[in-house]
Amino acid sequence: MGKKLFVGSLAWATDSSGLRAAFERFGDIEEAQVISDRETGRSRGFGFVTFTEDGSTQTAISEMNGSELDGRPIVVNEARDQAPRGGGGGGGGGGGYRGGGGGGGGGRRERW
């Protein structure tokens, strides 16, 4: 089992220090982070807790999953590695006709 936990269904008021405080009794914490929206800075309602020792995670999951934190029942499970995302794609096709005039001829071409 890994050292990193996913914590979901967090109250909007829960911050990283509150998250850390809730999990400290299970072992030394390397990092506790509530993920926030890049544009608004508001919590996205989930975060991660990373312990320094592997053994702390199972106890934390069994005791904290479904418990209340800041008035909301939270979801706690082992964090999974993020699936690699594509290269961001390219821009759209741009559509429309660039050069204007179209080749004459009309009609459909038969395919053989």
Image (cartoon, helix red, strand yellow):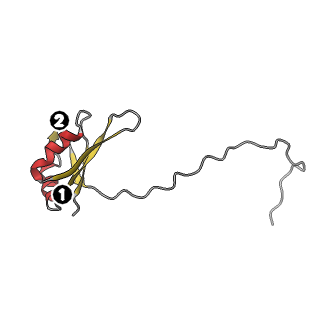
Q: Residue at x 49, y 56 (%)?
A: 86
Mark 1 surroundings within 10 Å by alpha-carbon count, few (fewer than 14), some (14 through 19), many (20 or more): some
Residue 81: x %, y % from top left: 33, 59
| Amino acid identity at mark 2 | Asp
Outermost residue, left direction? Answer: 25
Can residue 96 be seen at all in this image of the molecule? yes
Mark 2 surroundings within 10 Å by alpha-carbon count, few (fewer than 14), some (14 through 19), many (20 or more): some
Contact (Cβ within 8 Å) of mark 1 with mark 2: no
The circle drawn on residue 70 is 2
Q: Could you say whether the residue bearing mark 1 is in a helix, strand or loop?
A: loop
Q: Residue at x 21, y 59 (%)?
A: 3
Q: Quadrant of residue 18?
A: top left
Q: Relative to 55, does residue 94 appear above or below in the rendering?
A: above
| Amino acid identity at mark 1 | Thr
- Viewport quadrant of the C terminus: bottom right
- Viewport quadrant of the N terminus: bottom left
Q: Quadrant of residue 37?
A: top left
Q: Residue at x 86, y 43 (%)?
A: 101
Can residue 73 be seen at all in this image of the molecule? no
Residue 19: x %, y % from top left: 19, 42
Q: Nearer the viewer, mark 1 or mark 2?
A: 1
Q: Quadrant of residue 4?
A: bottom left
Residue 82: x %, y % from top left: 36, 56
Answer with left or right where residue 84 lies relative to residue 16: right
Q: Which residue is mark 1?
A: 52
Outermost residue, right direction? Answer: 105
Answer with left or right where residue 52 lies relative to residue 96: left
Q: CA distance from mark 1 to mark 2?
A: 25 Å
Answer with left or right where residue 62 lies relative to residue 5: left
Q: Could you say whether the residue bearing mark 2 is in a helix, strand or loop?
A: loop
